[in-house]
Each structure stands twice: as structure tokens, then as C-alpha cells.
Amino acid sequence: MKFKKPFRTFLPIVLLAIILIPVRDAQAVTGWGIGASYEVRDSDPSNGFGLRLERGILSAVPLVDFKMRAHFSYFSEEVSSYRDIGLPADLDVYDYGIAVTGGIGFGLLHPYVGLGLGQERFRSGSDEPLLDFSENSIYWNLYSGLRLPILPLVSPFVEYRFTRLMDADEFDYKHNSRFAFGVTLNF
């Protein structure tokens, strides 16, 4: 089916307007949110889950939506060979921290950026004493994401986070990246 020329130029404008027409903030009066996510990292263990609790702050600032966030992530994986030794190991990472985000709403698109501090606890369990250890490291992270508040109480999101470890002797990495895909419930 072929559309006439005026309709072909009008349709993209209408679709763009629907996406970018400013809508009221999807959060209720208190500005609290709780979320869960599936997360993928570029370091072992690579797959995990995350939880977050957010609270709106600085509501007097126009146009920018500031939030304070507490987050927790857990990654677990059984690898057949760790550190090129050829022996299996069970890897666990517990990651928790706090962060501040700032975002702007463009209709149904709510991009945001953030900065945070936290601690990562890495544990390797193995029958080999060399591979049986745990270590903690403080980190800072930068992240950016996109919320899609499709319903007043539900906001799916996608987020990219870069983490830099400050003091990690036993870790095989000093930084990692991750993508998180999840949903936040606002109340």
C-alpha cells in the first residue's frame, strides 16, 4: 500500500510529537521507586540481578529530575577454568552502593546520567587453595540510562554503567562495564 506524499510527511511528524509531547511526571507525590534488573557485565561472573531503591530529591530545581539511589547487584557463575590454571571455580560478586542521578523528561523518553560510590565483594570458591579467596574493593561508577514511563506506576529502563575499582589486588580487572535491563515501580 502506497501513501500519498502529504501523508508520508505528516506521519513522521505525528509519531515524533506523540513521543516527545511533554507528559506529567509518572511518579506520585512522594517520588519513591523500587526496581529490579537483569544485568550483564564484561567480567566473570558476567550475569546477575540487581535491586534499587530511589527517592526524588531537589524537587525545586526546574526541568531536571534529581534522584538519590541505593543499589545492590549479585552475580554468580561457575567457570570451568579460572585464571588460566585449568581448575573449576565458583565466582560470586556482591556489589552495593549509593548514587545521584539527574535526568530530563521528553514525553515518553527520560534520559538520565549518574555518579556513585560503592563496594564490590568478589569471592572465588574452589578445591584449589590458590583459587579459594575473597576480596573487597571500593569503587566509583558513572552511568547513563533511559527510562520509558509507559504507565503512571511502571517505568522500564535500560542502563549502561562503567565501574572503576580503587583498590583491588586479587581482582583480574580494575574496571568493568555492564548493561542493566529492568523495571521500576513508582509510588
Image: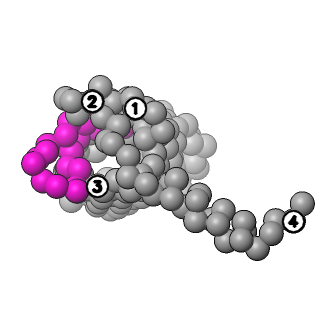
Instruction: Check disc 4 and report its element: helix, strand or loop.
Output: loop
The residue tagged 2 is: 28
What residue appears at the point 39 percent right and 56 percent down from the top-left corner? 106
CA neighbours of label 1 inside 10 A, class few (<14), some (14 to 19), many (20+): some
Does 52 appear in magenta? yes
Q: Residues within 10 Å of mark 3 (few under 14, many from 20)?
A: some
Residue 67 seen in render: yes
Q: Earlier in the sequence, mark 2 or mark 4?
A: 4
- Asked whether, in this view, residue 33 is left or right of residue 36, the answer is left
Secondary structure under the numbered disc 1 in the rendered image: loop
Q: Amino acid at mark 3?
A: Gly
**Main SS class of the magenta portion in the image:** strand
Q: CA distance from mark 1 to mark 4?
A: 37 Å
Q: Nearer the viewer, mark 3 or mark 1?
A: 1
The stretch of residues the image draws in magenta is: 48-73
Q: Amino acid at mark 1?
A: Pro
